[in-house]
Amino acid sequence: MKLNSSEKQILELISFGQGISRKRIAELLNMTQGSITNMTKLLLEHHFIVEGERIGSGMGRKEVLLYANPRKFTYLGVDIGGHAVRFALSDNCLDLLHEDECLMKDLLPQENRAEALLRKLDEFLAKCGADAASLDAIGIGITGIVDAGGQIVLNMPNAPYWDDINLVSLVHKHFGCPVFLDEGGRTMAIAEQMTGKASDIADFIVVQVGYGIAAGIMINGQLLRGVNNTAGLLGHITADPHGSRCTCGNYGCLENIITFPMLEKDFKERGGSGLLIEAYRQNDKIALDVCIDAGQALGIALSNVVNLFNPDTIFIGGPMFTEMPLMLDETKRTITLRANRFSTLSLKLENTSFGGRQGIVGTLALAKSRLIRELSDYTP
Ligand SMILES: [Zn+2]
């Protein structure tokens, strides 16, 4: 069986949404309700979708909502950050079944990171009682640069020994199912669009700050990639022309100012003692100054982003903002102060939907979105 283009469109609407009626699908695709009923019948028979609750009230006919069948597909997500690597298994509705993580420094030998990663993934699946045959697709997000073909990790500025690795080919050979690779900030944006707060927002940006900075720019419902697939390198724009050398080769990058290790370094260099977060909690003047300066640097960078892309919403994530809210306040204040006043008329700044799981949910959302879109040759 092959899905035709209308069946695929319907499947995408149901799979990427959060409950939709046949009537609404007919309106969106400009088709008759009869043809939608026939095509959804086929999708129901092949267990791609399930019927949910009835909605509507009063005298009108109640509409049944259609959902993706949670048991149809199983996804493995792998979120590779410079500091930690997270794994998760999910069902077809992206509900997490199992999750685990390891540190990048534990992927040894470091000259052979990819093989070490495959061993960790085997261990993870064994712990979950799953095997390669149970996986339908794998999504991988990295805090780094992926080639334009979406196959090769070209560079991870915060993690050596990842250059020029054809990760898609290696993982596919090992597990046998389709494997999809993208930059981590973009996967976070896909998660926000598919199951987060951006389901009805066409223009938005996701920014995650931790040991590195990841950003995904969604314009008119599509991810911005650029000709070399590097669009969205927010962490490596110059924030201080006189700043020190960054791991990417440039000088004074934003990542040299606002990431966990850099904030700690700044705190020490200004004469702070102990840990930044502890000092912040005690209203230590140096700690507060570090947060204000970092918030300003991020705010200036984001005000430029706002002027360039005029997003509806910026979703900001990262534990440092919940631990040290002054930094987020300063970021917001700086954006309002510095971005064009017409661009900020309706601009919203919100927390990301999945907190510490934004990256891993993103990799699962990547696996799902690409698998469903490539189902035209699917044989049940
Ligand atoms: Zn840099």
Image (tube, helix red, strand yellow):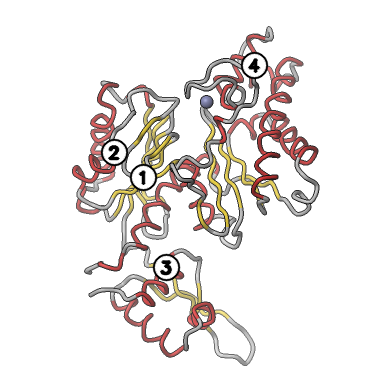
Distance from the alpha carbon under mark 4 to that under mark 2? 36 Å
Distance from the alpha carbon under mark 1 to that under mark 2? 8 Å
- Residue pointed to by mark 1: 181
Distance from the alpha carbon under mark 4 to that under mark 3? 49 Å
Q: At 53% from the left edge and 47% from the top edge, which residue is drawn? A: 354
Which of discs 4 and 3 lies nearer the camera? The answer is 4
Quick one: SS at disc 1? strand
CB contact under 8 Å: marks 4 and 2: no
Q: Is residue 84 left or right of residue 332?
A: left
Does residue 72 lie above or below 176 as drawn? below
| Disc number placed over residue 12 in the picture, else none | 3
| Disc number placed over residue 242 in the picture, else none | 4
Quick one: SS at disc 2? helix
- The kind of residue tagged 4 is His
Distance from the alpha carbon under mark 3 to that under mark 2? 27 Å
The foreground one among 259 and 373 is: 373
- Residue pointed to by mark 2: 167
The crowding category of the residue bearing disc 3, from other C-alpha atoms within 10 Å (few below 14, some 14 to 19, many at least 20), is some
CB contact under 8 Å: marks 1 and 2: yes
- The kind of residue tagged 3 is Glu
Percent across and percent down for residue 95 are 42, 54
The crowding category of the residue bearing disc 4, from other C-alpha atoms within 10 Å (few below 14, some 14 to 19, many at least 20), is few
CB contact under 8 Å: marks 4 and 1: no
Quick one: SS at disc 3? helix
